[in-house]
Amino acid sequence: MEHVTYRPLHERELNLSLFASFQRRQVVGDCWRKAGHGWVIQSDPFIDDWDEGDYDFLIRCLVHTLQTGGAVFGAFVDEILKGFTSVEAPPWGPRGEYRDLSSLHVSADCRGHGMGTALFRLAVGWAKEQGGEKLYISSHSAAETQAFYRGLGCVDAGWIHQEHAQKEPFDCQIEYTIP
């Protein structure tokens, strides 16, 4: 893959043109689903993609993240955004030990080359600087998404943020302990 540059994103650059070459499209076949007290993989084919309204909502969310003290990082190939991650500032959990990894996405044309891992590491570093002990992730249940997070060391969340779980009932609520 070409040279990738990673850097913090700033509020002034968060607009639709920044995402003009970003391809959210994900063809999903199998998903993890809660069954009793455990998880099973089930066939649930669909295509996950974003339209302009979804990007508008995303931009508002990312701006809010920055305005409330959180962080947003981007991955650029030839100065074109191809990945991003965001971490919310407010502490969560019984002891305030969690920081919310609110997004991590890599453009379809750049997946599988380590960009997601690098973005995850940036999020971990930022959360650690803020005093976080764990990242909380309400993650897409697609089998390949879960394989990515599990490969990084994520496990089922020991504490569930009920608002996330209710808002996205098919998401997997997972966590990562920050070393």
Image (spheres, helix red, strand yellow):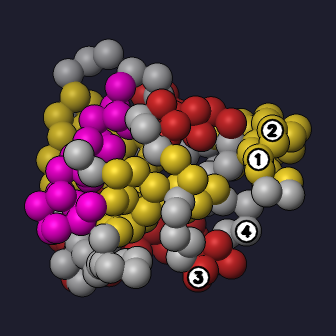
Residue at (43, 62) in percent of width and height: 136
Q: Amino acid at mark 4?
A: Pro
Q: Is residue 120 magenta?
A: yes
Left/right of residue 12 with respect to residue 139 in the rendered view: left
Q: CA distance from mark 1 to mark 2?
A: 7 Å
Residue at (41, 35) in percent of width and height: 152
Is there CB contact under 8 Å for labels 1 and 2? Answer: yes
Tag shown at residue 163: 3
- SS at mark 3? helix
Magenta-tinted stretch: 114-133
Q: Earlier in the sequence, mark 1 or mark 4?
A: 1
Residue bearing mark 4: 169
Instruction: Name the quadrant containing residue 95.
Output: bottom left
* Front position in the image: 35 or 47: 35
Residue bearing mark 2: 41
Q: Earlier in the sequence, mark 3 or mark 1?
A: 1
